[in-house]
Image (cartoon, rainbow, N blue to C red):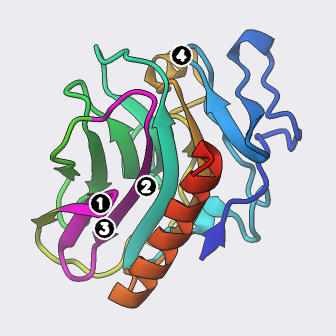
C-alpha cells in the first residue's frame, strides 16, 4: 500500500509549485484537515520516482496483477464539456496511454479506465449516480488484471465489469504518474484535462482488497469526510 500523505510535485516543492503560479495546485485547510486543491487551468502533480515512496509510484504498477485506488474527492466546478482526469498511471511505452486512470466523465459520473493486457484497447466502468458538485465522495476504483474484473465504488454504491484475464502488467515502469490530472501531463494541453476539485486521503494498493479491508479503509475515509464537514 502507498499512502499519499505528503503532497509534493515533480520538483519536490512543498507548495506543489509549477513554473506558472496561475497553474499551481495548492494546499488548503478545511476544519484543520489539509487537502490538495485543483482549479480549472491547473496542472496536476507529477511525482518524481522517489517523491512518495521508494522505488516510487512510477514502478508501482510494474509487473502487478491488480490496482486499487481510494480517495476522498469533492468536485468544485460544474465544467463537463470534456472528460477530466483525477489521477492516472501511464503505460511504460507512452505517457499518453493509460494503464490506470480515474476520471470525471462528460455525463458527470466517476469512471475507471484501465489498459487491457491482451489487446491494444482499454476497458472502463462508470458509476451509476451523477456527481454532485460540492459534496465529498469516497471513491474506490479497482482493476484486477489477473482475474479480469473491475469495479468502481462511490460511497459504497458499486458498479462492476468483466474482461478477459491476462495475468500481470508488463515489466515496465509507468512513464508518468499524475495526481489531480492526466498521466499525459506536463504538456500545454494537460491543463484541459484537470478537474476542478479537492482531494485528500489518497491510497494505492497493488492488489484487490479483501471485503474486510475494503470496509475498514472506506470507513476510515468516510470518517475523514466527517472531519471535513464538521459532522
Kindly indicate the quadrant of the structure image that contains residue 68.
Answer: bottom left
Q: Which residue range is magenta in the image?
A: 131-158
Please tell me whether residue 148 belongs to the stretch shown in magenta: yes
Q: CA distance from mark 3 to mark 1?
A: 12 Å
Mark 1 vs 2: CB contact within 8 A: yes
Provide residue 76's location: percent of width, then percent of height: 49, 24
What is the distance, in whole Å, between disc 4 and disc 3 at their CAs? 28 Å
Secondary structure type for disc 4: loop
Mark 4 and mark 2 lie on one chain; the one further toward the N terminus is 4
Look at the picture and state if 50 lies above or below 164.
Answer: above
> Could you tell me which residue is drawn at 50 percent across and 74 percent down?
217
Mark number, residue 40: 4
How packed mark 4 is, by other alpha carbons closer than 10 Å (few <14, some 14-19, many 20 or more), is: some
Q: Secondary structure at mark 2?
A: strand
Residue at numbered disc 1: 153
Give the class, few, some or many, for how many residues have Cα within 10 Å of label 2's Cα (few <14, many ≥20): many
State which mark lies toward you, 4 or 2: 2
Numbered tag placed on residue 166 in the rendering: none
Amino acid at each position: 500500500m502507498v499512502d499519499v500523505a505528503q503532497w509534493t510535485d515533480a520538483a519536490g516543492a512543498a507548495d506543489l509549485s509549477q513554473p506558472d503560479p496561475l497553474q499551481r495546485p495548492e494546499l488548503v485547510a478545511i476544519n484543520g484537515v489539509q487537502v490538495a486543491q485543483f482549479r480549472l487551468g491547473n496542472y496536476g502533480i507529477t511525482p518524481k520516482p522517489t517523491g512518495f515512496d521508494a522505488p516510487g509510484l512510477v514502478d508501482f504498477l510494474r509487473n502487478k496483477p491488480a490496482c486499487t485506488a481510494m480517495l476522498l474527492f469533492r468536485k468544485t466546478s460544474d465544467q463537463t464539456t470534456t472528460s477530466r482526469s483525477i489521477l492516472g498511471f501511464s503505460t511504460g511505452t507512452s505517457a499518453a496511454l493509460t494503464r490506470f486512470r480515474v476520471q470525471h466523465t462528460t455525463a458527470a459520473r466517476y469512471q475507471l479506465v484501465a489498459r487491457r493486457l491482451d489487446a491494444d484497447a482499454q476497458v472502463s466502468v462508470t458509476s451509476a449516480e451523477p456527481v454532485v458538485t460540492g459534496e465529498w465522495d469516497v471513491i474506490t476504483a479497482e482493476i484486477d488484471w489477473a482475474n479480469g474484473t473491475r469495479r468502481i465504488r462511490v460511497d459504497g454504491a458499486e458498479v462492476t465489469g468483466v474482461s478477459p484475464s491476462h495475468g500481470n502488467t508488463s515489466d515496465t515502469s509507468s512513464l508518468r504518474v499524475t495526481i489531480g490530472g492526466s498521466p499525459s501531463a506536463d504538456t500545454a494541453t494537460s491543463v484541459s484535462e484537470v478537474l476542478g476539485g479537492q482531494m485528500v486521503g489518497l491510497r494505492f494498493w497493488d492488489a484487490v482488497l479483501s471485503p474486510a479491508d475494503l470496509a475498514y479503509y472506506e470507513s476510515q475515509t468516510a470518517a475523514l469526510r466527517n472531519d471535513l464537514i464538521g459532522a
